[in-house]
Structures are given as structure tokens and as C-alpha cells.
Image (tube, helix red, strand yellow):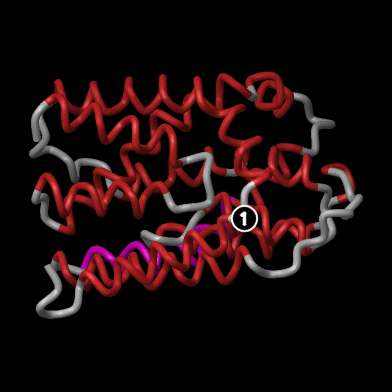
Amino acid sequence: MDPIQAAILGIIQGITEWLPVSSEGQSILFMIRYINISPEDTISLAIFLHLGTMFAVLIKFRKEFLATLNPDSGLLRILVITAACSGVTGIPCYLALKHTFTSGEGTTLLIGVMLILTGIILSLPSRRNAHRTREEITTKDLVITGLVQGFAILPGISRSGITITTLLLRNVEQKSALAISFLISVPVVLGAMLLDIGSITEVQPTNILIMFVTSFIAGYITMDILIRFAERVNFSLFCIALGAVTVILTLPGVL
């Protein structure tokens, strides 16, 4: 990997993190097809790339995170419950990924199938007239959202897409669902980093720094714009079509 490729990876993460197209899936596809990195290493790098956009979320929602220091804040409860439940589903999926998908074709096929699944999930009839606020969210809502979020460790599953859809189906208003989806990403990114710590030692420190800085800058600059864009565009068909193309490209004799 050279510095330009590292910067491109950071930009891909910074842009796609706010769209329901699986930033992890897009980053891994780029690494497999254009940088020729092994599937095991692409998973570790894709997890690391989230560190930059995580800091973008921390700065963007700094007031909300500071509010967790207040014992009366409901945010700490939201973060703890969703993070714990995400670990229940996320850790087994992570271990399966690291030990099962060792070929580029297998990983690409997985991404394609998961993108199709993401498209199907996004097509579920969400309640755009939902009215429940963050203060009205129940423990059951948080458990379900956390369990669903854990599956987003699978490349091709959009974390923001499935968590927002889940919250909307639980009758949570869209504005609150968007904010909660981004806030609850921080603990799971930190958890994934702890699980995967030390797995990217083969990458030069300079390129690691470039990936972090570019994903942070691209993520922070584009966050508001792309969130508004994602609200207006139907990504269901896009994910299904992209997933289908990805699957077709893994078939023998294609390309």
C-alpha cells in the first residue's frame, strides 16, 4: 500500500460511513481488487478505518457525549445497553470472519450477498411518521437495536442502515433514530478495535496515519451533507443492484 492508496481508503470510509451502503464492504472491495491485500488484513484495516469517522462523530456530537457525565442523562443507558448487546452478536460474527473467509473470492461473495440483504432490509416499510423521542425509548428497543448492530461487523451490512431502519420500525422518530445510530457507533468501534488490536502491524505507520486523518477529515466535512442526501434517496435498489453485480463478478469466467 502506498500513501495515495491509503488516502483513497480514508476518503472512501469518510464518505460511505454516512450512507447505507456498508463503508466496511466498500473499503474491503477496494483493497481486494486494487491493492491486493489478503482478506484477513482487509477486515482489520476496514475496522481501523472507522476510527477516523468515530472521532468525527465524537466531535460532532460532543455535547451529547459530555452529557453522559450527568447521572440524569439517558444517553449513558443507551450506549451501555446497545454496546453490550452488539457484543453478543458481533463477537461471534467477527471470529467467524477471521477464521472462515481466507480467499478474495469468498470475501467478495460475502460482501455481495450482505449488500443484497442490506437492500432488502432498507426496503422494509419504515414508519416515517414515527413519533417516539430518545427519552421514550425502552430497554427492549435498545436490546433489539444492539443485537442488530452487532451483525454490521459483516462486510456488506450497513450499520447505519440497519440500526436506523430498526429504530424506525420501533416507532422512533427519524431525527432521533439518526442521532442514536451515530452515537451508538462509538462504543462498538472501540470494542472492535480492542478485539483487533495489533492486526495491522504490516502497514507502515505513515499510511496508518494517512488513513486516520483522511477518514476523519472526509467524514467530518461530508457528514451533514451525506446524511441529508441519504434521507432523500432510496438506497434499497442501489444496494441490491451493487450486491448482485459483486456476486456476478465472483463467478468463474467473469472478468
Indicate the position of residue 68 as horizontal and vertical percent values: 71, 29
Q: Is residue 235 magenta?
A: no
Q: Which is nearer the eye, 9 or 247?
A: 247
Q: Nearer the viewer, residue 249 or 141?
A: 249
Label 1 crowding class (10 Å Cα cut-off): few <14, some 14-19, many 20+? some
Residue 113 in percent (x, y) is at: 38, 73
Where does the C terminus fall, quadrant-wise?
A: bottom left
Q: Quadrant of the N terminus?
A: top left
Residue that appears at 21% across and 50% down: 42
Instruction: Report the amino acid beneath label 1.
Output: Asn
**Residue at the extreme bottom of the image, as rendered:** 252
**Residue 135 visible somewhere in the drawing:** yes
- Label 1 belongs to which residue? 234
Residue 166 is drawn in which quadrant? bottom right
Residue at image position (19%, 48%) is 31
Q: Which residues are magenta?
A: 83-99
Q: Is residue 67 left or right of residue 199?
A: right
